[in-house]
Structures are given as C-alpha cells and as structure tokens.
Image (cartoon, helix red, strand yellow):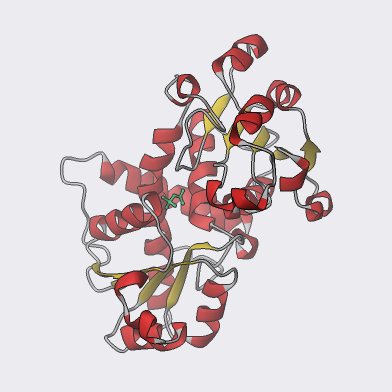
Amino acid sequence: MKHLSVNHLLGINELSQEDIQLIFHMADSFNEVLNRPIKKVPTLRDVTVANLFFESSTRTKISFELAEKRLSADIVNFAANLSSLSKGESLIDTVNNILAMRVDVVVLRHPNPGAAYFLSKNVDSVIINAGDGCHEHPSQALLDSYSIQQKLGSIKNKKILIVGDIKHSRVALSNILCLQKLGAKVRVCGPSTLIPKFLTNMNVEVSFDIKDSLKWCDVANILRIQIERQNLNFFPSSREYAMLFGVNKKILDNINKDILILHPGPINRGVEVTSDVVDSNKSIILDQVSNGVAIRMAILYLLSAKMKSKY
Ligand code: CP
C-alpha cells in the first residue's frame, strides 16, 4: 500500500503532488462507498478521533464527524466554550488530558495560526489541521481542487480565480498552494487592502478588475467577506464591495463563458455573490460539501494507515 509522505495534515505546504493525488484516489473509492445503500465501512474501528473545535464551524465539523462515523471510528467532540479552558487550562494540557484517554487522532480548529503545527511537536498523536487562524485550511483546499478535477478532468493549466478577502483567508492560501502543486494558473482579485504583498513572490497574478478576471478564468472560487473584521474598514461598506467585486448573473451573462463557481461557505448572499449565481447550474458549491466527506475519509484513512505502519 502507498503511504503519505507526512505523519500529520498541517498544511498543503508540506504535501507533495503525489500525496495530493493519493488523497484524491482514495476519495474516489470513498465516494463510491458513500453512494452505497449502507454508507459505512469498518476500516477505522480500532481508531479513536477527538474533534477539538476552538472556533465555530458548521461544514468542517460535521464533515469530519460524518467521515469518522462512515469509517467506524470512535469519536469524541470537544467544544471550547463548554470546556475547562475557561478555568485557565492550556492547549497542551487540554490535549494531553484528552490523549491520556487513548485518543489516536486529533482534528483541530483553532484561531491561532500555527496551532496545529505546535501540537504536532508537543503531543503524541496524529494532528489534522481543520483551520488555524489566517494560516491554512488544507482539507478545504483538497476538497476544492478535487471538486474542480471531478468536473474538468484535470487541474493542470486551468485558470483559477480566487475572489475576495485573500489577506485573512486560510482557504485562499491553502487553495493557492494546492492548485499550483497541481499545475494550475492562479489569479486573485479583490480590494487592494485585502491582497497581501507576499503573493507576488508566489507566482500569483493580482487583479483589481472582477470583469476582466472572470473573462480570464475557467473557475472562480468566491470567498466569504469576513463581516466580523469589517470594523477595521478594509473597504467602505458591504454595498460598495458588492458593486465592485460581487459576482452576479448579469456579469456572468455578459461574459458568456462556461465557468465553474465555487464557494467554501458560509455564504453572504448578495454581498460577494448573488443567489442567482449560487443556485445556478454553474455552481458546484454543494458538490464541494458532498466531496468534503470523501476527502476527509481519505485523509483520516491514509494518516491512520501511516500511524499503524509504525507499530
Ligand atoms: N468552509 C468552512 O470551513 O466552513 P465552516 O467554517 O462552517 O467549517
């Protein structure tokens, strides 16, 4: 059996192109399982997974939990707001106490960039990064690229546009790294205040013109405007953002080109994208969500197999 080159999933940065293709190959098999009447296999019945979410989540949390259940793993869920963190317990102490109950894999969402990397160096468990602050969200990027590959056959040489708040987005960074490893050309478009300068060193095109960018691309991945950060005034108002960078049916009809529309969710309908685009046949947003379970099954399976190969 082929193994991943990594022991943890901390970011796309650490994965090779072969690792990504291996995850996609396994996700194909798990998608087949998910289409059976009984959507469950006994593969991880000897593995215990803790889902530690220190930040809110709908899709990622449910998707990992379903993936674990479909693989027959034992699971324990942890919500930071109901834990002893409020009594001053540190992250390492919290996780080591959970691991003392013989947990094998930790799925971690945390507001601090580097939290998953820090845990991987300090606790004895497989760590999966489910989003660390503004840094990386590797399982999201993998399911995004997998969904594009499923629709277009290949990612190589495809033109992929990422629109919106690139600066604060862990989805953007992980997507850029993943798409480039798979041979795509990547462009970002958004307000200049939300485009980080380091992108020019990453061979990423930058544009401030949404119409030109949509004409250029084969695929547009539209990011959420992070309303919780708008007190910092990165742009004057959501209304102005929608006028200058929002994707709507009228712009797409004028371009008259078949492009795929992705969005990692949650969506602010009417701000970064209108409902007539979200709900159109160009959108593969719900395919992304469905594929998320298969991709997370593949990640859990491959990292558990690597862990067991060392026994
Ligand atoms: N895409 C994503 O990470 O969504 P959640 O925050 O709901 O998990």
Whether residue 132 sits left or right of residue 38 in the image: it is: right
Of residues 303 and 281, the one drawn nearer to the viewer in this rendering? 281
Asked if residue 238 shows in the view, the reply is yes
Whether residue 288 sits left or right of residue 101 in the image: it is: right
Percent across and percent down for residue 259 are 59, 22
Whether residue 51 sits left or right of residue 134 in the image: it is: left
Check the image and name the residue furthest to the left. Answer: 38
Asked if residue 177 shows in the view, the reply is no
Of residues 171 and 156, the one drawn nearer to the viewer in this rendering? 171
Percent across and percent down for residue 96 are 38, 87
Q: Residue at x 64, y 26 (%)?
A: 218
**How many dots with numbers?**
0
205 w.r.t. 79: above or below: above
172 w.r.t. 124: above or below: above
Q: Residue at x 56, y 47 (%)?
A: 226
Question: Which image quadrant: the C terminus?
Answer: bottom left
Question: Which image quadrant: the N terminus?
Answer: bottom left
Q: Residue at x 46, y 26 (%)?
A: 278
Q: Residue at x 69, y 46 (%)?
A: 234
User: In which quarter of the view is residue 109 placed?
Assistant: bottom left
Percent across and percent down for residue 279 are 42, 23
Percent across and percent down for residue 198 are 80, 55
User: In which quarter of the view is residue 243 placed?
Assistant: top right
Of residues 267 and 23, the one drawn nearer to the viewer in this rendering? 267
Of residues 181 and 117, the one drawn nearer to the viewer in this rendering? 117
